Image (spheres, rainbow, N blue to C red):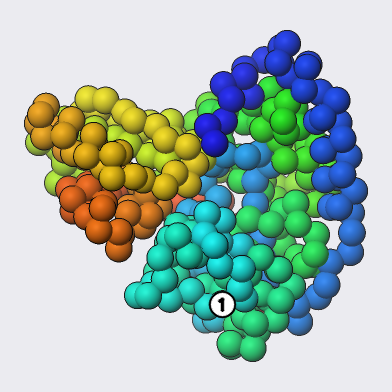
């Protein structure tokens, strides 16, 4: 679904009307987060976010897995496969699995490290361990207490923060902020802007480290698109974050097209995007996640072929501090 615009504005009438439902949802979510999770028998690193919608969680998980691999650790991603119909546990196969089966995030993760899909996180961790994992990197799962974590890093967008600060459905928070802050070990603020300032201050009050990151687009991909305007489209948690990255990369952004998170592209979507781009002389550009959802679908072959992908990498300023925290979590 498309997230409501009022989530990201000062709380008003719509939030007030939904506040009774939010109170119930928040109370249940907060209570679930206090449960003691099962131990996996190996270190578990969790990358999560406070809100529904994109904050840079998956690029952060990839950055962490690469750090672990550079340190000689056999890291395995654990994901629930949101957007796919498989329940797992199952190892993700980039060659044979589709986004309809395992979700776009799983396909993206498995390009970097072995990935285990499981709706049941405990069963997934057990399967990952049996497959030779030395450390698990969870992409999402902050609010899921079924599996005990050794280190939890929460990611927050510097431009959007936590929106109106209300719990779903009155706002974008997945659980009350205080309950979530109590379950993390560090906070990563991604991008510029001061919308996350209050959350960062609250984290520091709890003596949690606050780090800073930014999404860096692939220089080669940017260079290939410098010659003409682009039509940027995305169906992710925060499409505006992608559009801002495109513009800040120096590309000529002619028009944008936002779809709902994990949007399943149709033949009509594909035809419309291709026709508009060809008629106006625009190049098409999208995210790696969106492109993963198109791959293997004959009805989307023309769009997948014409759409340029803009890969991004998470760069963290406090990399030394992150490495130290990971070594501590691993008991090294």
Q: If the image is split into quadrants, where does the C terminus sit?
A: bottom right
In the figure, is residue 196 to the left or right of 176? left
Q: Secondary structure at mark 1?
A: strand
Q: Tell me residue 312's x, y (percent).
A: 37, 50
Q: Residues within 10 Å of mark 1 (few under 14, many from 20)?
A: some
Q: Tell me residue 130's x, y (percent).
A: 64, 88
Asked if residue 68 shows in the view, the reply is no
Q: In front here: 257 or 198? A: 257
In the figure, is residue 151 to the left or right of 27? left
Q: Tell me residue 67's x, y (percent).
A: 51, 67
Q: If the image is split into quadrants, where does the N terminus sit?
A: top right
| Residue plotted at (30% across, 63% down) | 296
Q: Tell me residue 191's x, y (percent).
A: 49, 36
| Residue plotted at (80% across, 52% down) | 183
In the figure, is residue 170 to the left or right of 35? left
| Residue plotted at (81% across, 75% down) | 39
* Circle count: 1
Q: Is residue 196 above or below residue 317?
A: above
Q: Is residue 46 above or below residue 166?
A: below
In the figure, is residue 29 to the left or right of 9? right
Q: Is residue 114 above or below residue 212?
A: below
Residue behind mark 1: 90
Asked if residue 46 shows in the view, the reply is yes
Q: In front here: 252 or 79? A: 79
């Amino acid at each position: 679904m498309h997230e409501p615009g009022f989530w990201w504005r000062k709380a008003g009438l719509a939030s007030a009307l939904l506040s009774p439902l939010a109170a119930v949802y928040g109370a249940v979510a907060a209570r679930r987060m206090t449960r003691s999770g099962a131990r996996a028998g190996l270190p578990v690193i969790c990358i999560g976010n406070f809100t529904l919608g994109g904050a840079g969680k998956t690029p952060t998980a990839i950055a962490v897995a690469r750090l672990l691999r550079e340190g000689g650790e056999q890291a395995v991603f654990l994901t629930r496969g949101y957007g796919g119909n498989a329940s797992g546990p199952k190892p993700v196969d980039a060659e044979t699995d589709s986004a309809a089966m395992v979700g776009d995030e799983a396909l993206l993760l498995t390009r970097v490290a072995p990935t285990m899909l499981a709706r049941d996180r405990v069963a997934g961790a057990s399967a990952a361990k049996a497959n030779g994992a030395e450390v698990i990197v969870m992409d999402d799962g902050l609010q899921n207490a079924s599996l005990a974590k050794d280190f939890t890093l929460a990611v927050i967008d510097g431009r959007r923060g936590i929106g109106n600060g209300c719990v779903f459905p009155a706002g974008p928070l997945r659980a009350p902020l205080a309950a979530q802050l109590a379950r993390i070990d560090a906070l990563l603020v991604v991008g510029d802007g001061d919308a996350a300032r209050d959350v960062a201050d609250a984290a520091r009050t709890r003596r949690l480290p606050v780090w800073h990151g930014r999404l860096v687009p692939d220089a080669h991909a940017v260079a290939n698109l410098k010659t003409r305007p682009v039509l940027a489209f995305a169906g992710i948690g925060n499409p505006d974050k992608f559009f801002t990255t495109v513009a800040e990369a120096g590309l000529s952004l002619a028009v944008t097209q936002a779809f709902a998170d994990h949007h399943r592209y149709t033949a009509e979507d594909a035809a419309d995007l291709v026709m508009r781009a060809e008629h106006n002389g625009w190049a098409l550009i999208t995210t790696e996640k969106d492109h993963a959802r198109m791959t293997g679908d004959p009805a989307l072959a023309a769009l997948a072929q014409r759409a340029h992908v803009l890969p991004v990498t998470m760069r963290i300023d406090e990399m030394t501090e992150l490495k130290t925290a990971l070594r501590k979590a691993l008991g090294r």
